[in-house]
Amino acid sequence: MAIEILGKILNIQTIAQGGGIREAARLRKAYGAGRWRKRKGMARVRLPSGTIVTAEVHWYELHGLGRRELKIKRILGDKT
């Protein structure tokens, strides 16, 4: 599902890092080695249908590489 982030991601928290990430081996193979972090936050997003909602988003992040595999975990409301 292709989503577009509108504005900033707020309330960013680290969920897991390093060996605590279940997908660590796959991430290293796909994007390279480093200190991977799984993070979450809240953001306004535009869904493929064009609907704009507030959602909890999760992603993996590596210093110097940035965010990878951004996904919506939960829609919180404010559908327009």
Image (cartoon, helix red, strand yellow):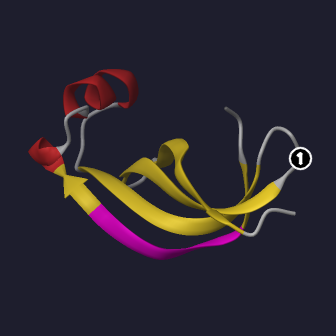
Would residue 8 be counted in the magenta stretch?
yes
**Is residue 16 or residue 29 the one in the foreground?**
16
Residue drawn at x 81%, y 38% as measured from the top left: 48
Residue 6, horizontal then vertical, whole percent: 76, 64
Q: In this view, does 54 lie above or below 48?
A: below
Residue 18 position in % (x across, y down):
15, 48
Q: Which of 41 and 19 is in front in this view?
A: 41
Binning the other alpha carbons within 10 Å of mark 1 as few (below 14), some (14 to 19) or many (20 upward) gives few
Quadrant of the rendered image containing residue 55: bottom right
* Residue pictured at 71% horizontal, 36% vertical: 2
Task: Tell me if residue 50 is in the magenta stretch.
Answer: no
Residue 22 sits above or below residue 13 on the image: above
- Amino acid at pointer 1: Gly
Label count reads 1
The residue sitting at 67% across, 66% down in the picture is: 77
Instruction: Give the labeled residue for mark 1.
Output: 50
Provide residue 1's location: percent of width, then percent of height. Answer: 67, 32
Q: Is residue 49 found left or right of 27 in the rendered image?
A: right
Q: Which quadrant would the C terminus be assigned to in this image?
A: bottom right
Magenta range is: 7-14
**In this image, 4 relative to 12: left or right?**
right
Quadrant of residue 12 within the rendered picture: bottom left
